[in-house]
Amino acid sequence: MKILVIGKGGREHALAWKLNQSPLVDKVYVAPGNPGTAAFGINVDIKDSDIKTLADFAEKEKIDLTVVGPETTLALGAADEFEARGLKIFGPRKDVARLESSKDFAKHIMNKYNVPTGAYETFTDFENAKAYVLKHGAPIVIKEDGLKAGKGVTVAMKIEEAVEALEIAFAIPDNKVVIEEYLDGFEFSLIALAHEDKVIPLEVGQDHKRVFDGDKGPNTGGMGVYSPVRRVTKEIIDASVNEIIRPTLEGLKKEGLPFTGFIFAGIMDTKEGVKTIEFNARFGDPEAEAILPRMESDLVQLILDIMNGKETEVKWSEKTTVGVVLASEGYPASSTSNAEIEIEDGMESILFHMGTKEENGKLYTNGGRVLIVVAEGDTLAEAKEKAYNDIEKIKCEKLFFRHDIGAKDVV
Ligand code: AMP
Ligand code: GLY
């Protein structure tokens, strides 16, 4: 088979790397890919937003299966375009991808189909939004509608922070804001392969969203991850699949919006049971980089199975993975580029590229999140030690990382 992966980050590197291991696969193309994917795949110089050219390429090369990484590609209608041309694509159509691209839509589906989530209200003007915040008090959560790369959310512990977030949000014309009840509990990410009402759940990972050690500083796309998460027992996963993922997929199907692709639920395990924080219509990044190396099953076969309506069991390695992100100075507010990266020999971990570029045989930073070092161990402590030892082998003056990835794994 010929496979096309759309995207250029660490998630797409991990997806392409895993798909490439399938005995069913002859060639993996990645558009546009990165220096990491070039090591085993064929990078194709087409932007992940250029839907028509991507579909032209898939037609011309007779690609058997396309897997979409980024939410923006889905929100632009990649699946609609590919399907209209009879091309097989694993990712939801534009209307369905609203599950991620519109928080308001996601909340509407959850409420209509009794999917547990925090109470909320949607606002289009500052005064009413502020009145709601004053009435309900803090802590409270302010979420801008639309795709914000994980940055449009303020978890306000004080009223003043909430009001300030509303001021910023409503400074943007025609903005919509969801104000949500604060959920207290243990957060984890559950990703599943889905097609209509069929589900193949994967093992869970835990992201570290805040930029600094001890969960300090602003939210980011994710600074590190580990998998599995021992606190998230089989009962919690089963409850998440049965109370959150299945009813959401069934609801979407009833609405005439059947989902195909990776569905990602950000879940809070609270005193009252599991509650949905958010949905994404794609694999998580950095979750993919820690979860896929633990998967022993053939990912291509799993995708074909689910697209044929078959709920297959997934085989997993008993090992624990820890992934530590190296980000550019200033991230998430800004990011520097063009800092040279040197990597010493002898690294035991897998290195996925998130935002790098290669020029004249040298590697440079090229974005906010740059690399992720993913180590495997018999225990979390062993994986952690390996990951942090290997980080020492990456020489670059403009990178920083969190030192406490996995520290929350207390059972
Ligand atoms: P989101 O982009 O919706 O995932 O939000 C980013 C982060 O904010 C989440 O990963 C949570 O850590 C936090 N968050 C979002 N919604 C809530 C909520 N209702 N209660 C507590 N924390 C939340
Ligand atoms: N790591 C969270 C996300 O991919 O949105």
Image (cartoon, helix red, strand yellow):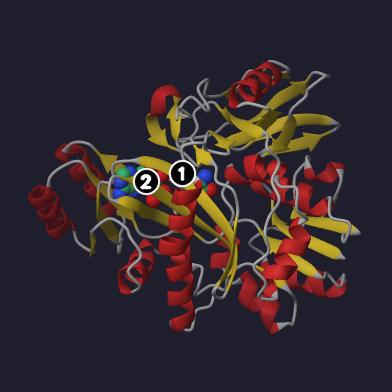
Can the viewer see residue 115? Answer: yes
Residue in the picture at 66% in, 39% down: 355
Residue 194 image-quadrant placement: bottom right
Q: How crowded is mark 1: few (under 14 residues within 10 Å), some or many (20 or more)?
A: many
Q: Is residue 74 left or right of residue 209?
A: right
Taking depth in this image into account, of 156 and 31 the one nearest to the observer is 156
Residue in the picture at 80% in, 18% down: 344
Note whether 267 is above or below 242 in the view shown.
Answer: above
Number of numbered callouts drawn: 2
2 vs 1, front mark:
2
Location of the C terminus (image quadrant): top left
Image coordinates for residue 125, horizontal then vertical, percent = 19, 61
Note whether 356 is above or below 349 in the view shown.
Answer: below
Taking depth in this image into account, of 102 and 169 the one nearest to the observer is 102
Residue in the picture at 74% in, 72% down: 55
| Amino acid at the residue labelled 2 | Asp
| Amino acid at the residue labelled 1 | Phe
Q: Which residue is denoted by mark 1 in the rendering?
A: 188
Q: Residues within 10 Å of mark 2 (few under 14, many from 20)?
A: some
Can the viewer see residue 149? Answer: no
Location of the N terminus (image quadrant): bottom right
Q: Which residue is denoted by mark 2 in the rendering?
A: 269
Q: In this view, does 23 lie to the left or right of 4?
A: right
Note whether 34 is above or below 82 in the view shown.
Answer: above
Taking depth in this image into account, of 392 and 61 the one nearest to the observer is 392
Image coordinates for residue 390, horizontal then vertical, percent = 71, 20
Image coordinates for residue 151, horizontal then vertical, percent = 42, 45
Mark linked to residue 204: none
Secondary structure type for disc 2 = strand
Is mark 2 in CB contact (under 8 Å) with mark 1?
Answer: yes
Q: Which of marks 2 and 1 is nearer the N terminus?
A: 1
